[in-house]
Amino acid sequence: MEHVVIIGNGISGITAARHIRKQSDCKITVISGETDHFFSRTALMYVYMGHMKFEHTKPYEDCFWEKNRIELKRAWVKTVDFEEKKLYFRLLNDDDDKEAKIGGAISYDKLILALGSTPNKFGWKGQNLKGVQGLYSYQDLESLEEITPTIKRAVIVGGGLIGVELAEMLHSRGIEVTFLVRESSFWNAVMPPEESALISRHIKDNHINLKFSSELDEIIGDKNGQVKAIRTKSGEEIECQFVGLTVGVSPNIGLLKVPQGNMIGREKPAFVLGVGGIKLNRGILVNEYLETNIADVYAIGDCAEHETPQKDRKSIEQIWYTGRIMGETVARTLCGKPTKYQPGIFFNSAKFFDIEYQTYGQVPAELPADTKTFYWEHTSGRICVRINYQAGSKSVTGVNTFGIRMRHEIWDEWISSGKSIEYVLENLPKANFDPEFFKQYEKEILEKYNIETGSNLQLKSKKGLFSKLLSAKS
Amino acid sequence: MLQKLGLFIFLAAFGLFVGTLGMNNYTLTSEILEKNFKEDALLDAKIELAAMVDQSYSNSYTFTVELTEGINQLNKVYIAQQAWDKKIYEDTILTIVKSSANGYLADNKGIMFLLTFGLAILGALLFILPEAQRPAGIKNNGIYFNPAMTRKWLGMGIGTFLIVFYIALYFKPQYIANWTMLVDPVSKLINGGEASRWFMYGFLYTISVLVMGIRYIIKYRHSKYQIFRTLSIMFFQTCIAFILPEIMSNLNLPSADLKNMWPLDYSFFFNYRIDKLIAGGTFGIFLLVWGIALFVVGVPVMVYFFGKRWYCSWVCGCGGLAETLGDPFRQLSDKSLKAWKIERYLIHGVLAFAIIMTIGVLYTYFTGSYNILGFIPTESLKSSYGFLIGSIFSGVVGTGFYPLMGNRVWCRFGCPLAAYLGIIQRFKSKFRITTNGGQCISCGNCSTHCEMGIDVRAYAQKGQDIVRSSCVGCGVCSAVCPRGVLNLENAETGSRVMIAPDVLLGNLMEK
């Protein structure tokens, strides 16, 4: 019986395992050193804040794995022998012990690498002091929990999603938080200025000390190797007992790197050869079938780098659902039905303290030349909608929405079929996914557009579930 | 600061409330006996209780125990003689205890009412209201660090108190006579008489729903659905369940809780109730027809259009208490497959029991025969249902187990009406919780905070709508979702996504 081994029990690896099991009877083993069972990484923050317990983050009951004949192995992989098709485990369960002896091995017929990410550290002085960490793994949560009683003030470096989450977490435990953001406004590398300002306001409203245009210079420790302060590039010193590094994540491919990788090629795609000759760049290079350059070895999720990314997609996408889609896709290829990775219209969502954010399609921070934008903001400054559309055809290309939930199905359809901005605004209530009795703003939004463009559009549909929507398409 | 003061006041008032049980002196007089015993039993009582008469007791417990023992002796004799009509019930004992009381509490009911109920409400509001200053939104911070909400010592303590309270209320009300005395002033105001144990319970229940309803509204004030739903619950409990029946009996009409219905109201078809309604003239007949129309027509029609939530989380009294007083415990419901299995056996078992019991009762009513199918005595069906389901399950377990098994123990595992509403919701209703495409991140907030123990995430993460007979439509899964994935909706029955798609929206690979 064929043996499929998956390294990594995150959303990508587990989705692959589940979908392989649906289609095949082969033997499946999932290896992880992090936890015994799959859990939702995005929910670690809620465990820290006391909204739930760790067991609640597990999307499947513990009996699920045996029932579905998915073997779970708790171990860290030390190295892979691609020629012998064998994995070697570390003897010690210690992440940092690079010299650890080999403690057993396992053979595979097909290997899926779903190694995930690791928080970035940019070589700051003091970055390895006690009390300095990112927030990615279960172990990160454990160590944060352990030092929490000693934290009075915390500094968070890096203004992205994990940074806001970490700020909210610490704040919920009564810790004073200073948030260092390199940019002049929050997340403005991703968000247009108005949205960036909206989030910045909301973070400040929640009593987070947000410092823009400030960069970390050095982390200062005391004599016990514990962080006691940080210094910014402008020379300001801030006393703190904790430093959260949330300056992005990178593919977790340390296991596959060799000390002197050979740089191949000066032009793109540049890559190095890792263990056993596997092609690596920032991540593990894969083709559109998620295959690496080594036969029977696949890479999915955060650790995979697409050699030829899809239109409007980055080569490395560290998003929950892209990991899931890669898992769904690779399962099919593995079960004898070669399938290309084809994520559709881009979408994502997040929550900044109390404000929910959703996006569908493309809404870059800087407006592309051939694109126009329409922006509406509620007087409260907490709710907004931005719709981008092509200057010529007026086809909508993307939407950002804060404080109003929208229907994925509808926006996916509107963007993929190139509906015009007028059509979309007239039918906007259709996309409304807010709970019953919530105030609706579609009329206000449409009026603003009418005034700005001198048109006279009228609302043409009502909020509700339109099941027939997709019947026109199929 | 204000909150700490509120908590202190509440705890002091609560302490005093418990303390009132030991207050008063007690003297049993011949007049009291004459008032409470029928002529043919009076002599027996005077002999049996001779040692107690005109004795002053400073300890309420000793007095109540001695009185109860004496009356138990009497009952033993009556049972041996099969003199059923002479048997003395706990309500009589309660009245005797109340009439025998004298002392500070008995003389100052109004002041004591204010010091207990009044201060407890004030303290609770001082604790609750300042929360409104914080930004609106989901604030579940620290729930799992709180010893009351995580089956720790405080939760166990609250659970024990509730269980003891319900046992006393149903089976030994004479021991909480002083609590009924506390609400006498309210009872006098509303219906002119002294408070029965059920008046005291109804008052306490209503106050709990109102005060904790205010807490709930503040907690979920960013959601209009939650605000409207809670106002509805508060209205139905206060006006329809508590005040209206009192008005009806003041007008000498047969009184009824107009929103309660069979089979939750399991005694609806009991002979004494039917007789009373029929004797009540046009209004009585109206109540009879209304009660039947509610579950025959009202339930199927309303559940078809809105799901069972129209009743369970907008109208029902049990649901009302669960959503308000019980809200802090919602996360304690068991989400495992095993719990779901037990739930289905139990709740449908209770429904079957209720139907069989009612058929038996009606059979006896119409035919006069005491056995159904020739060997099942309908009287014992009736009394065992009343004891096991009506008292133990719905009261003692149903509320007493809030801090142990979550706030919907009764609604989930026991309520026959919920089972009936659920069957219609599952098979013929426009209601579902829609899953929003591929946005779910499997975080588990929805499942954790589902009071009915539904593993909401299991559906959401595979793109399936949530169509479950147990869902009461409280809307909290949708409220706590950080990604806007869940929404309670009504649309054509056929549009519910009952089978998970092969892959979720967002993956363009060939389906």
Image (cartoon, grey):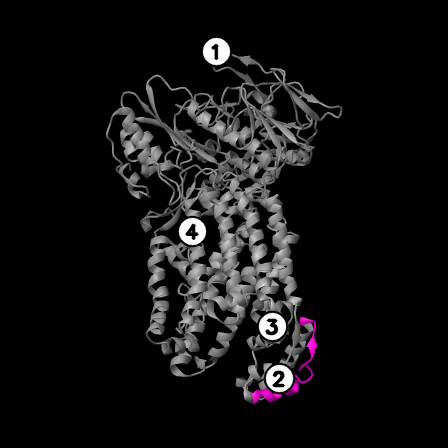
* Mark closest to the chain's N terminus, 2 or 3: 2
Distance of label 1 from label 2 (alpha carbons) = 110 Å
Q: Quadrant of the C terminus of chain A?
A: top left
Distance of label 4 from label 2 (alpha carbons) = 53 Å
Say the numbered circle drawn on residue B30: 2
Question: Can you tell which of label 3 and label 1 is closer to the viewer?
Answer: 3
Please provide the residue range marked out in magenta.
B40-60
Image-quadrant location for residue A241: top right
Amino acid of disc 4: Arg
Residue B416 rendering spot, x and y as whole percentages: 45, 64
Amino acid of disc 2: Ser
Question: Can you tell which of label 4 and label 2 is closer to the viewer?
Answer: 2
* Mark closest to the chain's N terminus, 3 or 4: 3
Image-quadrant location for residue B47: bottom right
- Residue denoted by label 4: B229
Assess disc 4: are there few (<14), some (14-19) or many (≥20) residues with their C-alpha within 10 Å of its C-alpha. many
Distance of label 3 from label 4 (alpha carbons) = 37 Å
Whether the residues at callouts 3 and 1 have beta carbons within 8 Å, the answer is: no
Residue at 39% in and 65% down: B258
Assess disc 2: are there few (<14), some (14-19) or many (≥20) residues with their C-alpha within 10 Å of its C-alpha. some
